[in-house]
Image (cartoon, rainbow, N blue to C red):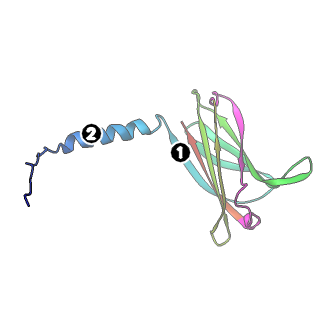
Amino acid sequence: MRIVTRPSVVRRRRPMAAAILCALALTAMAPAGAGTNSALYRFEGNRWLSLDLAVEDIRADTIKFEWPSTVLGIKSGYKATVKVVNGSTRQASIGIAIAIYDAEKRLVGAGTTGTKLGTLSPGDTAEFSVDFGSVTARLTTATQFHIALETR
């Protein structure tokens, strides 16, 4: 039995070039001008709560948890409405994430929302709805929530 071997080709590694390519790829994936802020608050259902949450001049002003929400008098689930004010001089895309916890700090619900098409114009206010539709069994035990605001 004859074993044929091929000469191996030795390639020079270029770690600096690879590092530069990785850095460029990561920079391209990050949204330009994105900013994020978050805060933890005491939960209260069925009333407007003031928020002290802003990214530069764009702020999440108030939130209302509708526990449970209704459509034409029929219970339709759990949702939160967040009012966002663009006090900046630029158009902004908005992202909002909310996590809800019980007294033992266990996660009992979460949801996200944001601008889908278009942006929030300077000086404008918009309401964003966050539905908590898939995990609802323990939402009635909510005692606090964490909200994050992201602008792009």
Which type of secondary structure does the marked residue at label 2 adopt? Answer: helix
Q: Quadrant of residue 92?
A: top right
Count of residue discs: 2
Q: Which residues are magenta?
A: 118-142
Q: Position of residue 46 (x, y in %)?
A: 82, 54
The reply to whether callout 1 and callout 2 are in contact (CB within 8 Å) is no
In the image, farthest residue toward the front: 1
| 25 displayed left or right of 123 | left
Q: Earlier in the sequence, mark 1 or mark 2?
A: 2
Q: Which residue is mark 1?
A: 36
In the image, residue 131 lies in the stretch drawn in magenta = yes
In the image, what residue type sits under mark 2?
Ile
The one of 36 and 16 positioned closer to us in this rendering: 16
In the image, residue 117 lies in the stretch drawn in magenta = no
Q: Which mark is residue 65?
A: none
The one of 71 and 125 positioned closer to us in this rendering: 71
Residue at (38% x, 41% y) in the render: 26
